[in-house]
Image (cartoon, rainbow, N blue to C red):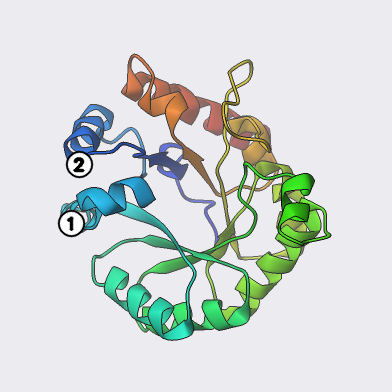
Amino acid sequence: MTTDTVSPKDRIIVALDVPHVDEARALIKKLGDSVGVFKIGLELIYAGGLALAEELAKDGHRVFLDAKLLDIEATVERATAAIAKTGAHFLTVHATDRKTLNAAVRGRGDSALKLLGVTVLTNLDRSDLSEQGIDMPPLALVQERARLSQDAGFDGIVASGKEAAALHERLRNFLIVTPGIRQAGTDVQDQTRVVTPTIAVQSGADYLVIGRPITRADDPRAAAQEIAEEIAGAIEAG
């Protein structure tokens, strides 16, 4: 599995983190073909986002359903099967254990849905993990959960750009999707482990999840095009 032939703009997953489907549709219209994937997260999923995902998929758009599934095996399996029927391209599942991951793989069946294991959320640091009873630095935990995901038959993982380089060296033919992207000199907001588009790509990230830097820009399409140009420069620089 490789993204060598994927264009810079198609590596951008824009996060439609808005509360209403109408707002999401307005953003999609503004962005047009300037990005490759539209991400529908929990906020929008519970406000009509699944129907929007089906609509977008039928229109030929690639959809990332950021459902972050985590439950007993039967529930995860059935939820994954239901999501596969929407035509979504990507689905996230928390990579906490093999029971959860295996259930998602069974639920996907022979559909084209690509499964991504969520390793450690990009707003967490070591002190946050300690509160969860996890005595590991983020990188070690990310690597362990990435290994679990790959062994289970997933297509890739979601991880911070700060861990992408180490993961890229150890996990061949495995997608790395990186959120927490901020351009140089901008506010990191509620993120902790953030990187620029250039650093993410040069560290081995295949896709970049980008929300507010695009969706809250005065001109979302121009913002997306600027980031695509940065990605292209990073790819060219190697």
Q: Which residue is mark 1?
A: 51
Which mark identifies residue 103? Answer: none
Q: Amino acid at mark 2?
A: Val
Q: Which residue is at 66% across, 33% downward?
A: 195
Is any part of residue 224 visible from this angle? no
Is 53 displayed left or right of 235 in the figure? Answer: left
Q: Position of residue 230 (x, y in %)?
A: 55, 26
Q: Nearer the viewer, residue 62 or 144?
A: 144
Q: Nearer the viewer, residue 218 or 125?
A: 125
Q: Quadrant of residue 55?
A: bottom left
Of the image marks 2 and 1, the number of the one nearer the N terminus: 2
Q: Position of residue 170 (x, y in %)?
A: 76, 63
Q: Position of residue 19 (x, y in %)?
A: 28, 38
The crowd level at tag 2 (other Cα within 10 Å; few <14, some 14-19, many 20+) is some
What element does badge 2 sit on? Answer: helix
Determine contact: label 2, label 1, CB under 8 Å.
yes
Q: Which residue is mark 2?
A: 21
Q: Position of residue 37 (x, y in %)?
A: 36, 46
The crowd level at tag 1 (other Cα within 10 Å; few <14, some 14-19, many 20+) is few
Is 67 displayed left or right of 178 in the figure? Answer: left
Q: Nearer the viewer, residue 159 or 42?
A: 42
Q: Nearer the viewer, residue 50 or 57?
A: 50
Quadrant of the rendering where the N terminus is positioned: bottom right
Q: Which residue is at 69% across, 49% downward?
A: 164
Q: Which residue is at 59% across, 32% downward?
A: 197
